[in-house]
Amino acid sequence: MHATTLVQAAGPTGLAGWIVAIMQLLGGPGAALVIAFEYVCPPLPSEVVLPAAGFAAGRGSMTLVGAILWTTGGSLVGALVLYWLGAWLGRERMRRLVSRVPLVKISDIDKAEAWFARHSAAAVFFGRMIPMLRMFISVPAGIERMRLSTFVVLTTAGSLVWNTVFVWGGYALGQHWYLVQDYAGLINRACGVGTALGIAFFVGLRLLQNRRERRRAAAAEGEKA
């Protein structure tokens, strides 16, 4: 089927139609290219890319297994780009940058580094299955210089699980593949709300701590006077 016809049959147009057209024209390599770009360009959500790959597989652009393997390979490439970005950034440069963020203290960075050191393997593996985190978890792995072979194995395994679910969903739904993103949107919204609440809690707690520190400092100055 011609790419234009495929896009028309796919349902959505715009970004989704463009993704489907690339996969129809390039097959598996096109799927890998798009999913790799998705890692460094969040406006391309995997919840659209992966079901589209499954739909393209159902139309004969590639096999179902091929779609899963190609997208997993693309996920690994995108993750490695961010890993090397983190390695280039380095621990000291990262600490200088983060320390300039309002309300963030060096002790917060130390705690985050200690947490990642304890849970790095689980963070990289399960992080591939959590919206938003699945892209950014590669950066701290690079900063902390996680062993590259370990990073590759965990990233591939986690991405394989995530990709299989969404590619198969698009394959099974056929021309209604885009409905997968509606269900995935619930997960994204839940993660977004959780993140917003977490940030709000952190900001509120830090403002309260700063106020208490100012009061203690003022009391100490008063006693000296």
Image (cartoon, grey):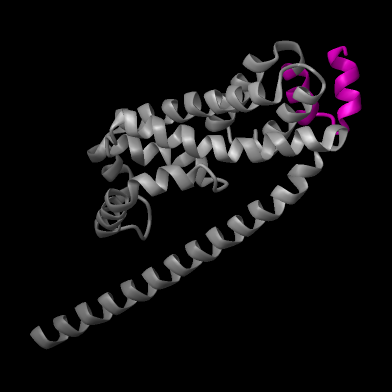
Q: Is residue 225 visible?
A: no
Magenta span of residues:
1-23
Quadrant, the N terminus: top right
Q: Is residue 142 left or right of residue 184?
A: left
Q: How many marks?
A: 0
Q: Position of residue 106 (x, y in %)?
A: 25, 55
Closer to the camera in the image, 103 or 62: 62
The residue that appears at 33% across and 76% down in the rendered structure is 211
Q: Position of residue 11 (x, y in %)?
A: 88, 33
Q: Position of residue 49 (x, y in %)?
A: 68, 31
Q: Is residue 6 left or right of residue 67?
A: right
Would you say the magenta stretch is mainly helix, strand or loop?
helix
Up/down of 95 relative to 103, above or below? above
The residue that appears at 38% across and 56% down in the rendered structure is 102
Q: Quadrant of residue 143?
A: top left
Q: Residue furthest left?
A: 224
Q: Is residue 125 left or right of residue 179?
A: left
The residue that appears at 41% across and 48% down in the rendered structure is 123
Q: Quadrant of residue 104?
A: bottom left
The residue that appears at 64% across and 21% down in the rendered structure is 66
Is 19 covered by the magenta stretch? yes
Q: Is residue 81 visible?
A: yes
Up/down of 25 relative to 202, above or below? above
Quadrant, the C terminus: bottom left
Q: Position of residue 141 (x, y in %)?
A: 34, 38
